[in-house]
């Protein structure tokens, strides 16, 4: 076995050359100007600007590192400072203290609206790829806006706001809104673990629709699960200021499956995919308290008298699913569109695991809420980079995909090794010979420039 001699080199080498993309994308926003214009509470003077604090932390998040202590190895990293155009890299205590100071700020001096608004503006400026849903013979186009809660497991901690979630673990229950089939995060909000999923969701939905409109002019299709079966949400979707089409699964509560079976037999169309299984699909127009106009209810009722294993049941097994919708399409299309809502579980997974955000780094609730918003911006930056790689067929990954997973972007582009050199007033980033990601890297850098 060959023995190696370990030495320190005078050359500037980096294992995180993908930060070049992050710096270029951030410069297309007004985050720097807007954050520096906000005074830091209890501080008349700060050596490290708000911009440097924000950019440095975003650089960490774009490598899947959320803990404040992870900034220490980058403090003397020349490329880290150059790529993000940092005047001074903050220390770990500075990061933590600055977030603690600004997180509880009033709405006028809060960083959160700045992050959310500039994130949406960045998606609009870059022209983020958004795959529309095309429905009906009249070719109506919609961009889905998926809203849902995802528990963050913080068991074994004493962080502020941690409580029992509906998943049976101690943690938080943040709510997210993802735009498009690509899943851009347009809004999010940290909540205590015991908060009901509908508590405050109507206002959150209205804000999400407004942020989504900053990104696209295409008609929105809101999709929510049964926990958000509330008239308040329907009022938001029918309001002129926040008008959007919707598919919301109905919470049947104490409604009888047998009664729904009789309704389906009367108003639905029956299919029998196999012996002992009947599927009824149809729709009804139903008035609802608090709404002037009735709501279209699409139903799917499945009656099983024989299991697929051949077991004959003494009493039929009845499965009922009902969806509230504003779309005029046939029941099968509505049901398929709602099932696609489940894709957002993949977006939750990327947010929690790929960006390491599930166990948030602070013990203070307000600070963790701010961290979550920064995580959403980092998520969108990485999603933009990943989607840009799909515009041409030059990536060494040959699988046909609709979007790149955040982890794939981090592993193959953000952590790409390179050598930084200076010559004739120019800075060059040299990737290794034979690196098959070089054409992709060069194309993306030129595209974002």
Image (spheres, rainbow, N blue to C red):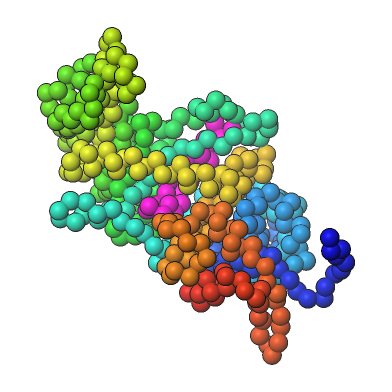
- Residue 307, position in %: x, y? 31, 20
Res 92 quadrant in image: bottom right
Residue at the spot x=63%, y=40% of the render?
A: 359
- Magenta-tinted stretch: 171-194
- Residue 212, position in %: x, y? 37, 54
Q: Within the magenta stretch, is there residue 172?
A: yes
User: Does residue 390 lie above or below 181 as drawn?
Assistant: below
Q: Is residue 171 left or right of residue 47?
A: left
Residue at the spot x=67%, y=43% of the render?
A: 362
User: Does residue 160 lie above or below 40 as drawn?
Assistant: above
Which quadrant holds the N terminus?
bottom right
Q: Is residue 9 left or right of residue 393?
A: right
User: Does residue 301 lie above or below 179 as drawn?
Assistant: above
Foreground of the two, 288 or 227 = 227
Q: Within the magenta stretch, is there residue 122?
A: no
**Total numbered labels placed on residues in the image:** 0
- Residue 144, position in %: x, y? 33, 49
Is residue 175 something that shows in the picture?
yes
């Amino acid at each position: 076995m060959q023995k190696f001699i370990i030495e320190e080199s005078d050359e500037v080498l980096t294992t995180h050359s993908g930060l070049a993309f992050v710096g270029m994308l951030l410069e297309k926003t007004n985050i720097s100007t807007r954050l520096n214009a906000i005074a830091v509470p209890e501080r008349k003077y700060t050596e490290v600007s708000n911009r440097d604090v924000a950019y440095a932390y975003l650089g960490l998040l774009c490598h899947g590192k959320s803990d404040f202590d992870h900034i220490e190895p980058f403090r003397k990293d020349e490329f880290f400072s150059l790529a993000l155009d940092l005047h001074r890299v903050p220390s770990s205590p500075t990061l933590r203290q600055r977030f603690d100071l600004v997180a509880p700020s009033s709405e006028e001096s809060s960083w959160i609206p700045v992050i959310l608004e500039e994130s949406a503006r960045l998606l609009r400026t870059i022209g983020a790829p958004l795959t529309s849903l095309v429905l009906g013979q009249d070719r109506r186009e919609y961009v889905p806006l998926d809203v849902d809660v995802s528990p963050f497991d913080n068991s074994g901690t004493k962080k502020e706001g941690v409580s029992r979630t509906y998943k049976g673990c101690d943690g938080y229950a943040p709510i997210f809104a993802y735009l498009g089939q690509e899943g851009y995060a347009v809004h999010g909000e940290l909540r205590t673990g015991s908060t009901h999923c509908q508590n405050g969701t109507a206002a959150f939905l209205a804000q999400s629709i407004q942020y989504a409109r900053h990104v696209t002019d295409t008609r929105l299709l809101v999709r929510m699960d049964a926990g958000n079966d509330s008239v308040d949400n329907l009022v938001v979707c029918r309001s002129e200021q926040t008008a959007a089409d919707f598919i919301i699964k109905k919470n049947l509560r104490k409604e009888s499956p047998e009664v729904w079976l009789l309704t389906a037999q009367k108003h639905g169309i029956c299919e029998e995919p196999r012996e002992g299984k009947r599927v009824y699909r149809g729709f009804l127009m139903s008035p609802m308290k608090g709404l002037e106009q009735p709501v279209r209810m699409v139903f799917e009722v499945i009656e099983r008298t024989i299991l697929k294993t051949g077991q004959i049941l003494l009493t039929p097994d009845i499965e009922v699913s009902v969806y509230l919708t504003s779309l005029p399409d046939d029941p099968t299309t509505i049901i398929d569109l709602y099932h696609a809502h489940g894709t957002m579980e993949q977006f939750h997974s990327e947010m929690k695991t790929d960006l390491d955000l599930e166990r948030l780094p602070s013990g203070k609730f307000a600070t963790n809420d701010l961290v979550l918003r920064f995580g959403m911006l980092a998520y969108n930056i990485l999603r933009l980079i990943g989607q840009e790689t799909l515009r041409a067929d030059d990536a060494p990954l040959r699988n046909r995909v609709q979007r790149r997973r955040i982890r794939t972007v981090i592993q193959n582009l953000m952590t790409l090794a390179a050598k930084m050199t200076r010559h004739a007033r120019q800075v060059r980033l040299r990737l290794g010979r034979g690196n098959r990601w070089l054409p992709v890297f060069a194309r993306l850098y030129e595209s974002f420039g």
